[in-house]
Image (cartoon, helix red, strand yellow):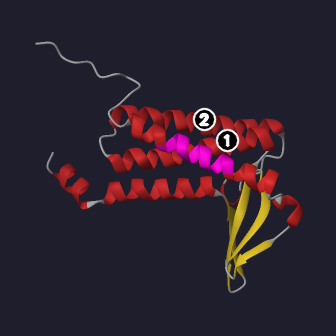
Amino acid sequence: MTQQRTPWLWGPLSQLGLTVLVLTLAFDQAHKWWMLIIFRIQEKGRVAVTPFLDLVYVLNTGVSYGMFLQDTPSGQWLLAGFAVLAVLAMALWLARGVRDKVVAASLGLVMGGALSNAVDRVLLGGVADFFSLHALGFYWYVFNIADVAIVAGVAGLLYDAFSPSRNRAAKST
């Protein structure tokens, strides 16, 4: 009886995760292109959409919340390179250890968002952010669709990590 070898870089849910990655990357980049080239948000300043949501253009040269600002091209390449390394690690995780569709889709969201923001860093010199939520005089940070995908992906991973079925399976071994 021969043992079937598992492909090292392709797992049973790799197609799902990579499809979500490509869709996330394409959707975010299309939105950014539209906002910058067609809508020309950078010329309009702040555009009120609802009483709690404005559109505005911010080029974030740091990471989340503007931390670790990198105002030089080499700094942006460094942050983009770090994102690519993180995506490669997650792709390996997807191929070698994921057996759940929620985890595969969640990893696809995180990878797609990270790659899209990395593309911005290389092409624009920072990450293009547009959405500004606010209420009662408090303004939350400005974000983009890639950021939403990353947060949704992390939420999916946390859901999986703390789900009762996952905990029961861990206790049974």
Q: Is residue 23 magenta?
A: yes
Magenta residues? 20-30
> Label 2, label 1: how many angstroms apart (C-alpha)?
8 Å
Q: Nearer the viewer, residue 15 or 162?
A: 15
Q: Is mark 1 on a helix, strand or loop?
A: helix
Q: What element carries label 2?
A: helix
> Which of the two discs, 2 and 1, labels the residue nearer the N terminus?
2
Q: Which of 97 and 14 is in front in this view?
A: 14
Q: Which residue is drawn at 31% across and 45% down?
A: 100
Residue positioned most to the left: 1
Q: Which amino acid does label 2 sit on?
A: Val
Q: Position of residue 12 (x, y in %)?
A: 32, 33
Q: Which of 171 and 73 is in front in this view?
A: 73
On screen, residue 74 versus residue 105, left or right, reads: right
Main SS, magenta region, reads helix
Q: Where is residue 122 in the image (x, y as percent from the top left)?
A: 75, 38
On screen, residue 120 versus residue 151, left or right, reads: right
Crowd rating for badge 1 (residues with CA inside 10 Å; few <14, some 14–19, many 20+): many
Q: Residue at x 45, y 45 (%)?
A: 107
Q: Where is residue 158 in the image (x, y as percent from the top left)?
A: 40, 57
The residue pinned by badge 2 equals 84
Crowd rating for badge 2 (residues with CA inside 10 Å; few <14, some 14–19, many 20+): some
Q: Quadrant of residue 99 in the image?
A: top left
Instruction: Identify the disc placed on residue 118.
Output: 1
- Tell me if I can see residue 62 in this picture: no
- Tell me if I can see residue 67 in this picture: yes
